């Protein structure tokens, strides 16, 4: 499988919902240059309010039908007839306000890439405080350049809801 997956996860609390903190959060990138690895691989970038949205990166090499996820979501990758089927399976713990139905899987031809975004609101088990997360999944099928995900995607899916 000639697939490259990049997860970009940004997390915050109500502290970063307004003012200068929100501006800093909104300036966080949704894509990064890829590490010098050979496909297939997964590149995970995490940014959070607790680290002032400083990117933290990790990468895994190897072929698998499920790309390692940064938290509790998964992406299923299935290859057939020279197409890559991509299906994001979101976490069941976060609230995705106003989105009862999820989009279907997307098929990519060689040379195409997909950007899939979904946001969540979580409630702390003990505190009851709200936490928020934006997941951006960038997936390419076929040869990639290090700056591929910095450009315009072939396909885009946005599951972005109003999270209060």
Image: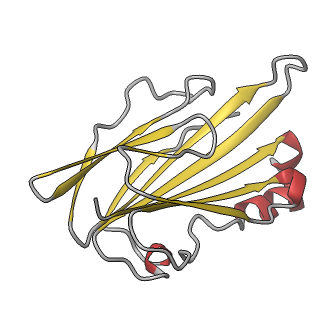
Q: How many marks?
A: 0
Q: Nearer the viewer, residue 60 or 56?
A: 60
Above or below, 107 against 139 in this view is: above
Question: What residue sits 80% from the left and 56% below the top?
Answer: 22
The outermost residue toward the front is: 62
Q: Quadrant of residue 65?
A: top left
Q: Nearer the viewer, residue 159 or 67?
A: 67
The outermost residue toward the left is: 81
Q: Position of residue 51 (x, y in %)?
A: 87, 58
Question: What residue sits 68% from the left and 32% below the top?
Answer: 121
Q: Position of residue 34 (x, y in %)?
A: 53, 75
Above or below, 36 against 5 in this view is: below
Q: Quadrant of residue 142?
A: bottom left
Q: Quadrant of residue 143?
A: bottom left
Q: Is residue 89 left or right of residue 86?
A: right
* Quadrant in which the C terminus appears: top right
Question: What residue sits 51% from the left and 27% below the top?
Answer: 98
Q: Position of residue 118 (x, y in %)?
A: 52, 44
Question: What residue sits 81% from the left and 23% below the top?
Answer: 124
* Quadrant in which the N terminus appears: bottom left
How is the structure coloured here? secondary structure
Q: Position of residue 79 (x, y in %)?
A: 21, 50
Q: Is residue 84 left or right of residue 125?
A: left
């Amino acid at each position: 499988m000639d697939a490259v997956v990049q997860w970009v996860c940004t997390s915050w609390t109500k502290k970063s919902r307004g003012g200068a903190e929100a501006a800093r959060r909104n300036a966080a990138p949704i894509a990064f240059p890829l590490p010098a690895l050979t496909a297939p691989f997964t590149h995970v970038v995490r940014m959070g309010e607790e680290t002032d949205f400083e990117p933290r990166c990790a990468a895994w090499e190897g072929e698998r039908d499920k790309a390692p996820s940064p938290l509790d979501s998964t992406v299923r990758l299935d290859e057939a007839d020279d197409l890559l089927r991509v299906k994001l399976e979101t976490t069941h713990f976060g609230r995705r306000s106003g989105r009862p139905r999820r989009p279907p899987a997307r098929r990519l031809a060689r040379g195409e890439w997909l950007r899939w975004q979904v946001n969540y609101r979580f409630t702390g088990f003990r505190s009851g405080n709200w936490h928020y997360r934006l997941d951006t999944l960038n997936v390419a099928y076929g040869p990639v350049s290090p700056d591929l995900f910095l450009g315009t995607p072939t396909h885009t899916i946005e599951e972005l809801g109003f999270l209060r």
